[in-house]
Image (cartoon, rainbow, N blue to C red):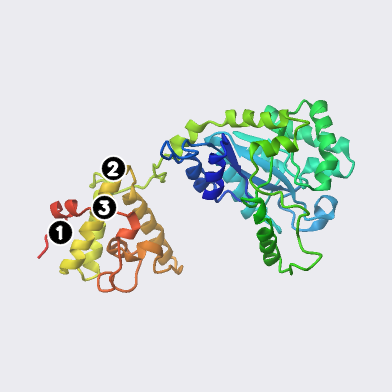
Amino acid sequence: MSEFVKNARQMGFRSIGATDHGTVGGLIKFWQECRKTYDADQPGADPIVPLMGCEFYLSRDRFAKSKDLQPDGRRGNRHIVLLAKNWEGYQNLCALSESSWVDGFYNDPRIDMKLLEKHNSGLICSSACLSSVVNSNLLHGRYNEAKKSVGLFKELFGDDFYLEVMFHGIDAERYIIPDIIKLSGDTNTKIIASNDVHYLKKEDGKSQEMLMCMSTSRCIHDEKRIHFPYHEFYLKEAHEMLDVFEDIPHALTNTNEIVDKIDIASFERNFGGVMRLPEFEIPKEFSSSYNYLCSVAKDGLVNLGLSESRDHIERLNTELADVKIALDNNNYDFSTYFLIVQDYINWAKREGIMVGPGRGSGFGSVLLRCLGISYGPDVISSGLLWERFLGFSSEKFVKESDFFEIK
């Protein structure tokens, strides 16, 4: 992802979009890459606007679990592109994605119009690729049905609905472009030009074809393998897109209208590094979650029989000091986070639900052992590192700490 964004910046793009099929899992990383800043002498030093979205699978009824209950006897999956124009839109993207996997999964994670009506606020919608409702109707000569579909989407999204046109050398794409232009005039809907990007450079197309064969268990020499006639799914420069759509240049300039609709400030307020945690009630005798965490950790160290161990005491002091510094300097409330995790881990144990020994860098924490979140080999004797968890250590704070009196 970072290479795609880096190249887009160097090409002078104002913006680039990420619309993975059926998932929003990569959007936070995508946001971070787009909003990075570099030294002024580097190409693409300034951040660009991330178009955070998803290409959803749209079905007639997301709860239906058979082909017979779906349109045209298929799995019932038609594509639709949704982009978040503000924080509310991002939350609706996440809600749609969650429901598509939890309630709507049948071969693919699916949404339907009823769900879209519930979560359409803050979203920009486009008609997507050949597999969309609009374009599949055009492809099969059902112009009036395509027009009705546009009307339904415009009822939900108004001027935030766009007809999408693309061309990657596929005959079917070329075939429906005149109808999309006609549909634009008949429904007063703007057209935007887009390009699917599956790989960075044109010469990478063969590698993509090999990956598709591997994912579908097909041989590269199999005539039935999934492949494209041309390697056009790469990141194109502006002049290349103008060459493709020279007859409808307004489809390219209309993309700037979408970029202008993105409320960057609303995303920055929520992606600005502040931890978003549910409220956690602490006993009244403690002034903060950090003080409560220290008390719980001290009791835990005693219960582990390590309250006389100088090494374990020093290590726990170090970890608690790092938690305090992360809170004071970066507003990272790991105290509340740890207490929440401890709460549901304890609940799972009471209910007889198996819990693991911990994972990742947290496995090397004395603090998490004291809280009962992780267990396993002794952290000190095994030489496990705490610094990997937060990425820094606060030796000065530890020297001044009197959390434990070291004997």
Front residue (pair 77, 182): 182
Q: Counting residues from the N terminus, which is met first, the one under dot 2 or under dot 3?
A: 3
The Cα atoms of the two marked residues, 3 and 1, are separated by 16 Å
Could you give the CA–CA distance between mark 2 and mark 3, rounded to whole angstroms?
A: 10 Å
Mark nearest the camera among 3 and 1 is 3
Amino acid on which disc 2 is placed: Asn
Regarding mark 2 in the picture, which secondary structure is present there? helix
Asked if one can make out residue 402 in the rendered structure from this viewpoint, the answer is no
- The residue lying at 88 percent from left, 40 percent from top is 142
Q: Secondary structure at mark 3?
A: helix
Q: Which residue is mark 1?
A: 404
Q: Residue 145 falls in which quadrant of the image?
A: top right
On screen, residue 316 above or below 162 = below
The residue tagged 3 is 322
| Nearer-the-camera pick, 165 or 147 | 165
Quarter of the rendering containing residue 10: top right
Q: Amino acid at mark 1?
A: Phe
Tell me what residue is drawn at x 83 percent, y 40 percent. 176
Q: Nearer the N terminus, badge 3 or badge 1?
A: 3
**Other residues around mark 2 within 10 Å, as few (<14) / some (14–19) / many (≥20):** few
> In whole angstroms, how far apart are the C-alphas of marks 1 and 2?
23 Å
Instruction: Count all numbered tags in the image, as a single digit.
Output: 3
Q: Secondary structure at mark 1?
A: loop
| Amino acid tagged 3 | Asp
- Label 1: how many residues lie within 10 Å, few (<14), some (14-19) or many (20+)? few
